[in-house]
Image (cartoon, coloured by chain):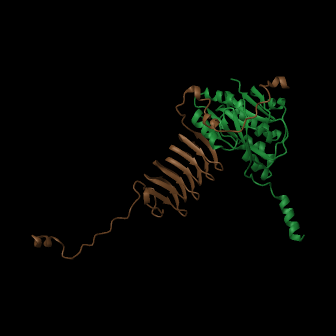
Chain colours: A green, B brown
C-alpha cells in the first residue's frame, strides 16, 4: 500500500454518508388507522393536508382527486438526511422550529408517518411542537412508531394502495432509527393532542391517530 | 385587347414580388427575436442558450429548454419544460409537462405532469396532477374533487385494490388503548 492509498483511505473516512440510493425493498402491509384518518378528512370541506414524507405521486392523486384536499408536501426525511450528510444534526431542532410556513391552526390532517423514530429527542420535540401548532382544533395526526430496533438504515415511502393497505417502499437513509419510544414518551411528545386510536400491527408498528382537542 | 393588357403591365418586365414578411409566432409577442423557434406543427421551441426575462404569452404549444424568469401564459396550450429548461416564473397553461426545473407556482386548467427527474418548487393548482417516481416536488397541490358520491369518497382506491396483490398481513390485535398498555 502506497502513501496515496493511505491518504485516500483517510479522506474517505471524512466523507459524509452517501446520498440516498434507489429503492431497496417493497412490500404491502395492512393499516388500520389510515381509514379512520381518511374518514376524518372527508368529513371536512376542502381539508388541508400536510405530508411530511417524500412526495409520492399516487398519494397526491389519491388525496387530491378523491378527497379534494389541498396537500402540502414537506419532505422532512430529506431535510434530516441533508443535516446528517452535512454533519449539522445538532442544528436540526432550530431548523425544524422555523421550517414550516403554515399558519397556526391551518391544517386539518398531518401524515407524520414514522418520522419521529428517526429524530433525536430534541428534534422530535421541536417537530411535535410545530405540528401541534399547525393542526386545527379537531384535526388529526397519523404517526407510525416502531416497537423493535431494526438494524438497517432505510427510510420508508408509504404508498397508499387502499384505505386498508400501504405499500412500504424502502430506500436508503443516512442514518437509522434513533430510539424506540414508549407509549408514554409518545404521549408526552404530543402533549397538546389526545390519542384517538392506537393499533399494534404484526410488523411491529404502532399506528397512532391523534386528535387535537376542539 | 391583348395590347391593352400589355399596356397595363409595367415596362420593367417580369415582376419582382417582394418577399413575404418573416413568420412571426402568432399571439406570442413575448418571444424575443433571439429565441430559436420552429413553427412546425405549431410548437415553438426555446433553445438551451436562450434566456428570457419578462412576460411570455402564446397561443401555441411551447417547449422550453432555456431559462425563463417572469411569467408564462399559454392559457389554451401545452407548456413543456424540457430536461434542460430552468424556469423561475409563475406559469399558467392548459397543461404543463415538467422534465426540467420549475421554481414558482404552476396553474393548469387540465393537467400538471412532473416526469422522472423533473422538479417543481412551488404550488400547483390543476384538476389532475401526476408526479413520477424520482421527481422532486416541494409545495402544495390543490386539485378539484371529482364528482363522487359521498358514500364512495372514503373508498377511492378500489381500482388499485382490485389488482392482484400479495396477501396482506393482518393486525396482530384489535385496537389497543394506550392507557391500557402503559
A211 lies left or right of A146: left
- In this view of the protein, which residue sits in the foreground, B150 or B46? B150
- Which residue extends farthest left? B1
- In this view of the protein, which residue sits in the foreground, A140 or B176? B176
B31 lies left or right of A202: left
What residue is drawn where x is 76% and y is 43%? A94
Res A42 → quadrant: top right
What residue is drawn where x is 45% and y is 63%? B33
- Which residue extends farthest bottom? B12
Res B5 → quadrant: bottom left
Residue A132 appearing in the image: no
- In this view of the protein, which residue sits in the foreground, B163 or B74? B163
What residue is drawn where x is 78% and y is 42%? A93
Q: Residue A9, how many percent across, how many down?
A: 86, 63
Looking at the image, residue B24 lies above or below residue A189 = below
Q: Residue B17, how many percent across, how many down?
A: 28, 70
Q: Residue B110, how many percent across, how many down?
A: 50, 43
Q: Residue A36, how many percent across, how many down?
A: 68, 27
Looking at the image, residue A46 lies above or below residue B135 = above
Residue B181 appearing in the image: yes
- In the picture, the quarter occupied by the C terminus of chain A is top right
A46 lies left or right of A104: left
Looking at the image, residue A118 lies above or below residue B182 = below
Amino acid at each position: 500500500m502506497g502513501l496515496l492509498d493511505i491518504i485516500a483511505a483517510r479522506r474517505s473516512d471524512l466523507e459524509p454518508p452517501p446520498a440516498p440510493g434507489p429503492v431497496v425493498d417493497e412490500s404491502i402491509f395492512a393499516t388500520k388507522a389510515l381509514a379512520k384518518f381518511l374518514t376524518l378528512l372527508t368529513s371536512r370541506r376542502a381539508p388541508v393536508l400536510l405530508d411530511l414524507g417524500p412526495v409520492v405521486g399516487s398519494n397526491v392523486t389519491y388525496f387530491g382527486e378523491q378527497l379534494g384536499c389541498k396537500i402540502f408536501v414537506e419532505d422532512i426525511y430529506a431535510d434530516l438526511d441533508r443535516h446528517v450528510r452535512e454533519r449539522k444534526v445538532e442544528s436540526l431542532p432550530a431548523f425544524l422550529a422555523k421550517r414550516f410556513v403554515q399558519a397556526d391552526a391551518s391544517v386539518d390532517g398531518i401524515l407524520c408517518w414514522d418520522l419521529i423514530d428517526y429524530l433525536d429527542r430534541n428534534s422530535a420535540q421541536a417537530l411535535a411542537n410545530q405540528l401541534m401548532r399547525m393542526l386545527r382544533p379537531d384535526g388529526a395526526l397519523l404517526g407510525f412508531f416502531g416497537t423493535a430496533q431494526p438494524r438497517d438504515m432505510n427510510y420508508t415511502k408509504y404508498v397508499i394502495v387502499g384505505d386498508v393497505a400501504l405499500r412500504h417502499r424502502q430506500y436508503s437513509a443516512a442514518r437509522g432509527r434513533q430510539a424506540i419510544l414508549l407509549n408514554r414518551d409518545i404521549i408526552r411528545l404530543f402533549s397538546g393532542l389526545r390519542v384517538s386510536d392506537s393499533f399494534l400491527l404484526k410488523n411491529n408498528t404502532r399506528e397512532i391517530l391523534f386528535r387535537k382537542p376542539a | 385587347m391583348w395590347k391593352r393588357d400589355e399596356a397595363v403591365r409595367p415596362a420593367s418586365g417580369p415582376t419582382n414580388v417582394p418577399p413575404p414578411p418573416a413568420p412571426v409566432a402568432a399571439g406570442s409577442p413575448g418571444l424575443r427575436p433571439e429565441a430559436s423557434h420552429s413553427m412546425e406543427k405549431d410548437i415553438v421551441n426555446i433553445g438551451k442558450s436562450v434566456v428570457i426575462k419578462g412576460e411570455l404569452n402564446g397561443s401555441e404549444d411551447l417547449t422550453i429548454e432555456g431559462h425563463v424568469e417572469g411569467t408564462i401564459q399559454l392559457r389554451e396550450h401545452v407548456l413543456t419544460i424540457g430536461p434542460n429548461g430552468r424556469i423561475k416564473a409563475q406559469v399558467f397553461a392548459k397543461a404543463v409537462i415538467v422534465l426540467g426545473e420549475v421554481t414558482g407556482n404552476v396553474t393548469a386548467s387540465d393537467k400538471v405532469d412532473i416526469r422522472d427527474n423533473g422538479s417543481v418548487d412551488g404550488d400547483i393548482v390543476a384538476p389532475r396532477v401526476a408526479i413520477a417516481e424520482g421527481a422532486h416536488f416541494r409545495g402544495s397541490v390543490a386539485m378539484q374533487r371529482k364528482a363522487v358520491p359521498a358514500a364512495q369518497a372514503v373508498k377511492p382506491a378500489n381500482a388499485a385494490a382490485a389488482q392482484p396483490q400479495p396477501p396482506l398481513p393482518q393486525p396482530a390485535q384489535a385496537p389497543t388503548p394506550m392507557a391500557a398498555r402503559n
